[in-house]
Image (cartoon, grey):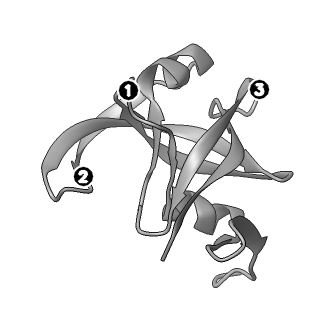
Amino acid sequence: MGTFRVKVEIGDPQGQRWEAIEALMDTGASFTVIPASILRRLGVAPRERWPVELADGRQVEKEIGDARVRVDGRTAPTLVVFGDEAAEPLLGAHSLQALLLAPDPVNHRLIPVPGLLK
């Protein structure tokens, strides 16, 4: 496992508005978490609240919404968690799977992988 930072773009569900950010790539994270102000600025609307487990094991309810993520020219729809303003953006495993990318924690980069489902 490993943790490193990657440059990504987060967009609205239609892929019309984008914002470049640097996100923490934590190989143990499931969901992509973006500060709520960025998502609202892009026009991403919360659609419901889900229980989310934090790194310290606590469960909290957070708003989730539909967005798009783009890394190195690859674009995919993804669910995002509306994060706290002080929280660093986090790129999660579900977004990586949608992009067909995997973390290379040794070289601190994302690498293309073949999809499991076609």
Labels 3 and 1: the sequence-earlier one: 3
**Kind of residue sitting beneath label 1:** Ala
Q: Is residue 16 positioned above or below 56 on the image?
A: above
- Kindly indicate the quadrant of the structure image that contains residue 57: bottom left
- Residue closer to the observer: 99 or 33: 33
Q: Residue furthest left?
A: 58
**Kind of residue sitting beneath label 2:** Leu
State the mark number for residue 54.
2
Labels 2, 3: front one: 2
Give the secondary structure at mark 2.
loop
Residue at screen point 19% across, 40% down = 61
Marks 2 & 1, CB-CB < 8 Å contact: no
Q: CA distance from mark 2 to mark 1?
A: 15 Å
On the image, numbered disc 1 is attached to which residue?
Answer: 86
Query: How many labels, in total?
Result: 3
On the image, numbered disc 3 is attached to which residue?
Answer: 16
Give the secondary structure at mark 1.
loop
Labels 2 and 1: the sequence-earlier one: 2
Residue at screen point 70% across, 80% down = 115
Q: Residue furthest front?
A: 106
Query: Where residue 60 appears, x then y in whole percent?
Result: 16, 43
Marks 3 & 1, CB-CB < 8 Å contact: no
Count residues near mark 3 (Cα–Cα under 10 Å), then give few for <14, some for 14-19, many for 20+: few
Query: Where residue 39 appears, x then y in whole percent?
Result: 52, 25
**22 relative position to 71: left or right:** left
Residue at screen point 54% across, 50% down = 24
Q: CA distance from mark 2 to mark 3?
A: 31 Å
**Kind of residue sitting beneath label 3:** Gln
